[in-house]
Amino acid sequence: MTFDANDIIERRSVISGAGQSDIGRRLFRDPLELTLDACLAAIADAGLTTADIDGIATYPGPMSVPAGFSGAGVVDVQDALRLELGWWTGGIELPGQLGSVINACLAVAAGLATHVLCFRSVFEGSAQGTGGRSSVMPGGGGGSGGYRATGFMEWTLPFAAPSAAIWVAMMAQRHFHEFGTTREQLGQIALNARKNAAVNPNAIYRDSMTLDDYLGIRMISTPLSLYDCDVPCDGATAVIVSRAETAPDLRKPPIHVEAVGTALRGRPSWDQFDDLTTMACRDAAAQLWGRTDLTPTDVDLAEMYDGFSFITMAWLEAMGFCGKGEGGPFVEGGQRIARDGVLPLNTHGGQLSAGRLHGYGFLHEACLQLWEEAGERQVAGSPEVGVACAGGGPLAGALLLTKHR
Amino acid sequence: MASETNAMSDETAPPFRLLPRLTDLNRAFWTGGAVGELRMAACGACGYINHPPTPICPLCHSKDQAPRTLSGRALLHTYTVNYQPWMPGPELPFVVAIVELVEQDGLRLTTNLVNCDIDKIKMGMPVKVTFEAHVDGDDTIYIPLFEPEGTL
């Protein structure tokens, strides 16, 4: 079966620019300033000006709780840059963080906008200060103060399970049980991230990490240890999604959006999903591969969400880079996922070592690699096909990107 | 059966827990422990146990939803031993578990596994409900926890 842009309208969109602010563990800078730094960098990278931007997409929109989770919303940026918009969206009910970028692809395909500024901005590092993660948890300040849990949290908070670390740990434990996956295998995702971060000047943690370091660090929630959890940070990432026809006007060759995946087919829950050894990524990935003639063996690099190491393993299996349940053997030893392996993975260091830029960091890195602008960490051999996948649990969005069409 | 936890006694005081906001939909679930019963919403038309509860049956769309008393028996589907002090709560480490209730395939509950040595935990082990009472204002909320089957 062959598809064209009449069937797969995301192919009418390209990524024309990408930018990031300063990134740090705790910068104590105005989060809007970081956001605008990233936005202006991306606009300039595309060879555009603010007058060309007629759309905005972001995740999750303005949110004050949990602290530091959102540095700016759509209207903050629209007003700060005095943008004239034909289309805009910001929200958290999306197919993962990159769902906002996928919305932008569809908006330019539909003609509602020509150049959409997409951004994600966090300041979780500064917001947590020296109080650690517990300082931004509901109830973390001490008593309940009259707070009562509702929604999904009703079914987790009364059991002292406020963190996705716990929910993902239980999925990993189930995966270990069904498929014999080991901590030594899972740890390769963290070690690989750290190895790549070592050659990323913007990464948060760049010191070398050994398997013994990994196995020896304190446990958070079995089988996940500290090094299986991403590192909260401050920083913003932006990309420009443009209509494909504008490519001749752009500063650099566009990155083509070959296909996207956004499906949500199981129960949208961290505990009620039908198969707790995988996540919504299972269905988003299957949908993506149903919209292209390319196959997993065509992919030259994979930038896939690692809010926790196990989520990356779930994405590896979901995207068909290995069989179901084979994520452990696939990453074992780390050679396959290294920058010179068959599937370079999280080449910037992921959120585990480069910082929790929350989904957008993966897309930014995929673009840099396809533009061959990744410096010392550049994957050799002019990679032509990459994937950027984000989200865990009931959130999943994936983009298949190509250098040529 | 409900364990006779007395929130007012220092010796047997349960750990701090953030409590759920009670609604007409969830009250049966969070208060059934008063009489030692685990209750979940079930559909009067097709029998489907609907958890978390919603106003209509997700399968047949009937609005005839009423609490049903379950056996309180379940199998351990997965778990984690948590060492991280996220918030005030049970003494560390404690076990968070997802159990699958015997009444319906895939009917799961996130809970705590209690009264069980960590090295005795086995995936798939049979467990049964036990309740921990918390008084907050006018409400007494009974948190359904699970312990190994055979625990006295």
Image (cartoon, coloured by chain):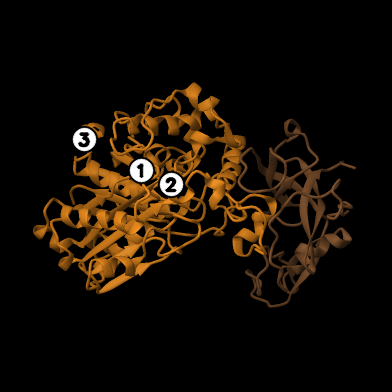
Is residue A174 found left or right of A9 in the rendered image? right
Secondary structure category for the residue under label 3: helix
Supply the letter of whichever chain is brown: B
Residue A87 occupies quadrant: bottom left
Marks 2/1: CA–CA distance: 8 Å
Q: Colour of chain A?
A: orange
Residue B118 percent coordinates (x, y): 73, 34
Q: Hey, what amino acid is under mark 3?
A: Gly
Q: Is residue A392 visible?
A: yes
* Mark 3 Cα shell of 10 Å, populated few (<14), some (14-19), many (≥20): few
Mark 2 near mark 1, Cβ–Cβ under 8 Å?
yes
Marks 3/2: CA–CA distance: 26 Å
| In the rendered image, residues at marks 2 and 1 fall on the same chain | yes
Q: Which residue is mark 2?
A: A125
* Mark 1 Cα shell of 10 Å, populated few (<14), some (14-19), many (≥20): many
Q: Which circle, 3 or 1, is nearer the viewer?
A: 1
Which chain hosts label 2?
A
> Looking at the picture, does residue A324 appear above or below residue A282?
above
Q: Residue at x 55, y 32 (%)?
A: A181
Which chain hosts label 3?
A
Total marks placed: 3
Q: Residue at x 53, y 45 (%)?
A: A131
Q: Which circle, 3 or 2, is nearer the viewer?
A: 2
> Looking at the picture, does residue B79 appear above or below residue A286?
above
Q: Which residue is mark 1?
A: A24
